Image (cartoon, helix red, strand yellow):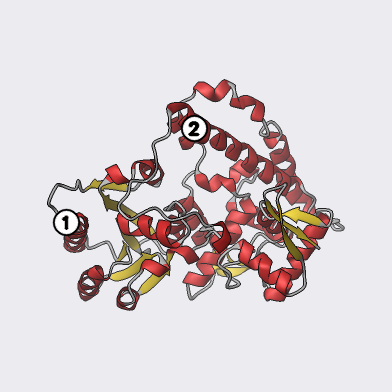
Amino acid sequence: MDLEERLAVFIDYENLALGAREHLGGMQFDFGPIADALAVRGRVVARRAYADWSYFDEDRRMLTRHQVELIEMTQRMGASRKNAADIKMVVDAIEMAFERDYISTFVMCTGDSDFSPLVHKLRELNKRVIGVGVEKSTSRLLPAACDEFLFYDRLEGVEVPDEDQRAPAPKRGTRSRKPATAPERATAQKVPTTSRRAKAAEAVAEAVAEPAAPATSGAVEPEAKPATRRRKKAEPAPAPVDVTPEADIDVSEQEEEAPASSDAPMEVRVAQTLADLQSSTSGPVTASALKRTLLRKDATFSESDYGFRTFGEFLRFLADRGFVELAAGPSTGDPEVSLPEQGDTSAAFVLLRAVVQESGGSAALSGLKNAVRKKRPDFSEKALGFRGFLQFAKAAEAAGTVALAWDDDADDYLITA
């Protein structure tokens, strides 16, 4: 634990939020992918976002859910809207660099080149600096000044709309959106939260209850017990009927009960985290490092929720199904964990075709990525160099593997194989 990096995150929120809206087809900024990317790089001990929050009313809940401290920089008449938040952010970062020696890495979430002197000063003070910004709104000077720079639109979990699906970007400086009425907010926020829990439980139950393979040896027998226990525990989960009785429950309570990371099945969460660790570290990944990172992403994670007594037993179960590979580690009980070879782009196209064929020869684009990940949990179109799953599907069509066409009735792309 003493060798872990300690990270402090400073967010120039107006720069990121408006950059996403203007250059990423009007999409809403989400801090979740940044939080996941930083979780594999160390322990985040401070998160601060700077803005005049009257312009970003609807973003506050999302940031609060990620434990981000909101620093209010109210814009006064005659004052510069830009410099007030920037100067406060610089002062706080320098103060923290001097007062908290244990913080080894500063994460500057902005694309503004005005922060380059701050980055240089932090590096003079022997601090590592990671930058985060939207690619098209990031100055070319800033990435070169940082030790590492992450483009927001390239992060895993950021689904950039395709060109023909993009909404017109709002004018700079306008408020987020027209405030929704109370009934609209209740409908928009309560239902997805409940369905997320149901879908997550269904996916986990299906993944664990699904036979590993035509098991021929008794070696798989011990791993079958946890799956049986989990199946019994997860059966009542698909209960959309409970949506009506829960209508009177406060939305904030529902969000606390359903963390965002519960959307993905367990093997997908492990595979994504492991892939991030392998790409960001030079050495092998141990089971203990993997579990620490999973806990950073979701503090409620526990292998016992899936019916396993220890994390090692949980990993052996995934290894038996071919999701991960285990090797002897530096100490007993702490094996090295790695992903099986994913193959090249052509192999990914073949995988897509196989999934579509299993769906009856055609499938809608929405939801298809989850189906692919059921067969290959570590699948990532971004790791193959594609910005989004639609771009990946279009490349598969260009290679002659599948056919892609817009379906007006389904209001979605239809992929056939």
Identify the image quadrant of the N terminus.
Answer: bottom left
Q: Residue 302: x percent and y percent?
A: 55, 45
Mark 2 residue crowding within 10 angstroms, few (<14) / some (14–19) / many (20+): some
Q: Residue 56: x percent and y percent?
A: 33, 45
Mark 1 residue crowding within 10 angstroms, few (<14) / some (14–19) / many (20+): few
Q: Callout 2: helix, strand or loop?
A: helix
Q: In the rendered image, which residue does mark 1 sit on?
A: 80
Q: Which mark is residue 254?
A: 2
Q: Callout 1: helix, strand or loop?
A: loop
Q: What is the quadrant of residue 97 in the picture?
A: bottom left
| Residue 331, visible in the rendered structure | no
Identify the image quadrant of the C terminus.
Answer: bottom right
Q: In the image, what residue type sits under mark 1?
A: Ser
Q: Which mark is residue 379?
A: none
**Residue under the image location 17 percent in, 63 percent down:** 98
Compared with residue 37, is residue 297 higher up or lower down, i.e. above or below?
Answer: above
Residue 285 as seen in the image, left or right of residue 415: left
Which of these two is toward me, 348 or 413? 413
**Residue under the image location 35 percent in, 68 percent down:** 130
